Structure formats: C-alpha cells, structure tokens
Amino acid sequence: MKMNNTPKEIFEKIKSCKKIILPLHDGPDGDSIASSCAMKYLLKRDFNIDSIIITDEKINDNFHLIDFVKEIDFTKSLGDLDLKEYDLILFLDHGAIKYRRENVIELPKNKTISIDHHNTNAYFADMNYVDPTKPSTCSVLIDLFQGWKIKFDKELSNRLLLGVYTDTDGFTGDKIAIKDASFLIDNKADYPGVVEILKYNVPLKIAKYFAILTENFNITNVGKYKIGSSIISKEDTEKLNLSISDIRLGPNHLQTIGGVDLLFTLAETNKLIKGSFRSRKNIDISLIAKELGGGGHKLLAGFYLEKMPLEKAKQKVFEAIEEVGIHKIN
C-alpha cells in the first residue's frame, strides 16, 4: 500500500543531514529546476546544509537566463558521485527514478526522500511525500514550507514561482496554481521578471519545432472523442538540436488548437521516442501513459518508447488508448 510519511518526519530527516544531493529528473523542466533550486537555497539559508543539484542533460535555453540556474552542475549524474559521501538523495518532482529503458543506479538504503505531485508516483524512496492534488512540486513545497514555519523571502518566492508557472502552462485552468502564485507575489516574488524571461525569450529553434508539430497535427475520432496527434522525425529533432527538455514544450503549444479532447506527440531521437500527452477536457491521461510505461499528472503525462517507425509508435499509442479507455476525472 502506498503511504506518505508525515511532513514532520520528512522535515526532521532533512534537518539531520549535512550533505544532500538534489538530482533533476529526465529532461528537466521548470518544476524540476525550480523545486530543486528552492530547496538548495532554503537548506543553506536556514540550516547551513550543503547541497548539490545535478543533471547531465541539457535544459531549454531560456532557463539559462535565470540567475539561480547557474547553481546547477550540468556535468554529473548520480552514477558520477560517491554516494557514501552524502547523507541524503532528495528527489523532487520524480514520478519514478527513470521512465527511460536504461539501467537504473542502485540507491543506498535509508538515504532517499521523494517529494512529488504525480498521481502515478512509484513511492520508490525510503521516505515519500506525494500530494497529487497539487499542480506542481513547487506547490507541494509551498504547503510543506508553510507547515514547517519557513520564511518566504523574495529569493525563495521567485524560485518557487518558476515551477508553479511552468508546470501549469502559465497557471492555465488551475485554481491552486493561481492561489499559490498570489501567495508568492505577496511574498515579494518578481512575477513580471520570472514570466517575461520565459514568455518572451523563446529560442528560434523552439518556434521552428512548434511549426513542425502544428503542420503535422491530425485529429482522429475514437468513439465520441477526438484525439489530436503530431509526430516529429529524428531528422528534424537532430536538425534543430532538440533536447528532451526542449521536446517537452511541444504539447503545451498544441493545446491552443481547438476541436480535440486530448492530444499526444511523438518525437524521435537518436536513441528513443519521447511521447507526451495533454488532456483538454478533464480526461485522465496518466492512465494511458502508465500503460505505455510512463506516468505523470492526470492532465499532463509522458512516456518513452523504444526505437520503431513513427507510424508504428503512433498505432501503439492508439492501441493503449483503446485498451485503457478514456476516463473522465471525477
């Protein structure tokens, strides 16, 4: 049975540590970056705990315009570190260790905590705190920090705002996100500064990527539902030099297209196919992603497929939709 530890248990374990690792998840997004950077800042400010944020993957170019992103070490993964030298590995925004079909590093015992909001979370850590009612892991942290009586200054609020904003596509359709953003702004978060960096600095290669996805977009009738889909070939992802983090942005762009109930994208890379779902009309697409070996939120989810022809991969997704069915969120 999946069970959470209490906020107090999580807090006491974190405070007892001297050195902590904060790994970003596969294809780091804004919530992964922001939640880890917020935690790193808090650990040093309030408890003088040293921590390191690590990833060996690229992130979207416009994230590099944000000052605190400089705190991330982009040269390391968990396999590059001597884990015995650290007291804790704190996984923020990880639904699982990895969704990719690669070897997973063996984690040390009694040294892992997972704080997350994905309803498909695998509860893989020694201690877990998962709240799937929250729209982002940063929103989970806001709730935890308030319970822990943490002071929200401008720097902490800015970092958390990045995750709340990006994981809800600009607070789209989520009352909790709007409430959390208002709380952070009341605590000196620079709303225009955070949003303008992301909204008005879209790299040209990303705009070209969006154009290809839009050109390739199709709508298929499945029973009474209309399902949108778009694919992009390895030739195009390599030509545009897209990272997994870049690829994650595509489905959000397609959500502005009308006439669909849910949509998915398939992006072919040199090693795999990255798939992403978005729900448009309160449909739980995490169940379909889980059928394909992935997971995520009820309204936003992802998965990876092994290399195969894109049309075959597309057929595999529609087969998963038929197998799982389309379920409305209560």
Image: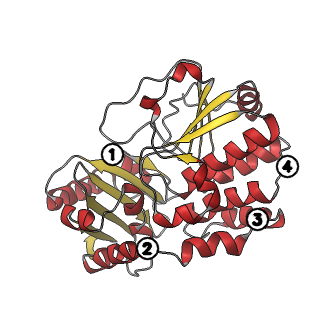
- Mark closer to the chain start, 1 or 4: 4
Task: Give the label, 2 or 3, closer to the camera.
Answer: 2
Question: Helix or strand or loop: what does disc 2 sit on?
Answer: loop
- Mark closer to the chain start, 3 or 4: 4
Q: Which residue is mark 4?
A: 151
Residue at 62% across / 66% down in the picture?
174
Measured from the top left, where is residue 195 in percent x and y? Answer: 63, 72
- Mark closer to the chain start, 2 or 4: 4
Which one is nearer the viewer's eye here, 307 or 203? 203
Which one is nearer the viewer's eye here, 235 or 318? 235
Q: Which mark is residue 189?
A: 3
Q: CA distance from mark 2 to mark 4?
A: 35 Å
Q: CA distance from mark 3 to mark 4?
A: 13 Å
Q: Is residue 274 visible?
A: yes
Q: CA distance from mark 3 to mark 1?
A: 39 Å
Do tag 3 and tag 4 residues touch (Cβ < 8 Å)?
no
Which one is nearer the viewer's eye here, 57 or 4? 57
Q: Which residue is mark 1?
A: 291
Q: Quadrant of the C terminus?
A: bottom right
